[in-house]
Image: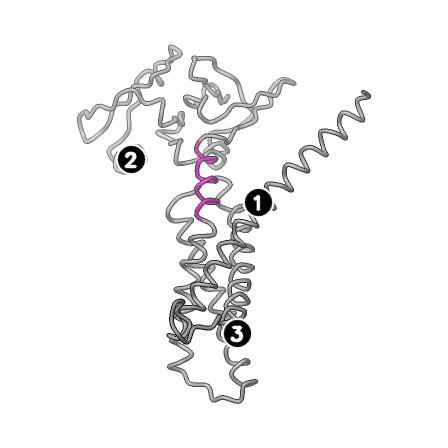
Amino acid sequence: MSISQAIKNAITTVSLRFNRSSLLRWFQKLIVFIVFSLILSHLSSPESFPGGKSYRFPIEGFLSTIILCVLIGIIAELNFLFYKKKNFSKKVEIASVSWFMASTLGYITVMYIPLAIVLNKMAGGEIEFYYLLIGLLITLLVSFILIGLAYSLDIYNLHKLSLKGIAITIENGGKITKLTYENIAYFYSEHKIVYAVKNDGLAIATNFTLNDLEEKVNDQLFFRVNRQIIIHKDSVDQIEKIANGRLRIRLKTSIGNDAIAEIHISRYKRKSFMAWFQ
């Protein structure tokens, strides 16, 4: 088999896997939307309860709920893709997830109000603020539950990826080294060169500054303790309280550098360090 054919086959395989994964993800969300629409349409009126003598399938309610869920799904998906690229690719935390939910509900509110007014006008009815507000609150509650059901697994997987799967690529002297976060003990600066130290003690020179790395790495896992060092949470071996409200940190991996063998954290950074570590 030629090299070009092998590359073609590899691209085809990756593309098929991606398409299957994407289709499976959308199929799961479609099931959530349909089941949710069925429940809502059956709960909307007493005669829609299954098992009753006057039961009939609420086709109108089901179709209108499906349309509403699709609109909510489109808004949520576009916002999720934005947050996935902007925030979730680096870290997934309560604050970023909360902002995702809040902004999505905000966009749904912007969509709902003019749409409800237009539909009400088309139906020949009068616009009443009370019913508009009640409809909006119900829609937001439904949206919150639906988005939570549809995206909880995606967000959880991104959270796992941000903790374990992300790697940093180091280029130096014509060599390219890829290190996953879980294999890095700390970064330290010496003589204007920043080194990445692996868990086994191997130090690799990088072309980054500590400021670059502070912006780049996951701050759930890494903390800049001072101007010289950024440490990984799992590399901490012992934390000791010392005079003047300071902390002394001992790391599991040492390379014989005095500044790293015993790290001091000022009382001003103590609170933020302990909040990160715990």
Circle 1 residues within 10 Å: few <14, some 14–19, many ≥20: few
Q: Which mark is residue 219?
A: none
The amino acid type of the residue labelled 1 equals Leu
Q: Secondary structure at mark 3?
A: helix
Which residue has dot 3 on it? Answer: 60
Which residue has dot 1 on it? Answer: 24
Identify which residue is drawn at 39% across, 44% down: 93
Circle 2 residues within 10 Å: few <14, some 14–19, many ≥20: some
Question: Of circles 2 and 1, which is in front?
Answer: 1
The amino acid type of the residue labelled 3 equals Glu
Question: What is the span of residues highlighted in magenta in the rendered image?
Answer: 152-163
Identify which residue is drawn at 39% across, 76% down: 133
Choose between 165 and 239: the one closer to the eye. Answer: 165
Q: Secondary structure at mark 1?
A: helix
Secondary structure character of the magenta stretch overall: helix
**Looking at this rendering, what residue extends furthest in the top direction?**
256
Question: Of circles 2 and 3, which is in front?
Answer: 3
Which residue has dot 2 on it? Answer: 269
Q: Earlier in the sequence, mark 2 or mark 1?
A: 1
Question: Is residue 196 rendered magenta in the image?
Answer: no
The correct choice, above or below, for 275 with respect to 147 in the image is above
